[in-house]
Image (cartoon, grey):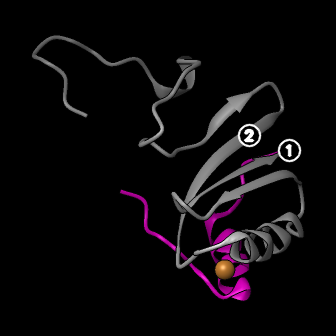
Amino acid sequence: MTGEDGVKTPPARDRPARTEENDMSTETDTRTTTVYQVTGMTCGHCEGAVTAEISALPGVTSVKAVAATGEVTVVSAAPLQEDAVRAAVDEAGYELADRS
Ligand SMILES: [Cu+2]
């Protein structure tokens, strides 16, 4: 995300709205919403498996997995360690895509 010369983009955390393609953590009060990209999900069963595994992580309050887009939206009390999320997704049989 390179702006024009002299134009500074404000820090991400200061901006309330985010674009879908920029899947980074957003802090809202004490809750953190993070959108992860998971590869390999094809149906509701996949969504359920990923949701169940990530829901089991400490501090996670909400998980919404969408097989069609591969997006998994996780709401947690504190920012999650990506390694932990990756392990949970792996446990479910899928793969967490690298962020870019
Ligand atoms: Cu499936």
Q: Which three-letter amino acid code belongs to the residue tagged 2? A: Thr
Mark 2 or mark 1: which comes first in sequence? Answer: 2
Percent across and percent down for residue 11 are: 45, 23
Percent across and percent down for residue 65 are: 69, 59
Which residue shows up at 62% across the image and 65% down it? 82
Left or right? Give the position of 56 relative to 65: right
Label 2 neighbour load within 10 Å: few <14, some 14-19, many 20+: many
Quadrant for ligand 1 reads bottom right
- Residue with the mark numbered 1: 77
Q: How many tags in the picture? A: 2
Write the start and end of the magenta stretch as one range. Answer: 78-100
Do labels 2 and 1 touch, CB within 8 Å? yes
Q: Which three-letter amino acid code belongs to the residue tagged 1? A: Ala
Which residue shows up at 64% across the image and 47% down it? 34
* C-alpha span from label 2 to label 1: 6 Å
Left or right? Give the position of 99 relative to 43: left
- Between 32 and 42, the one lying in front of the other is 42
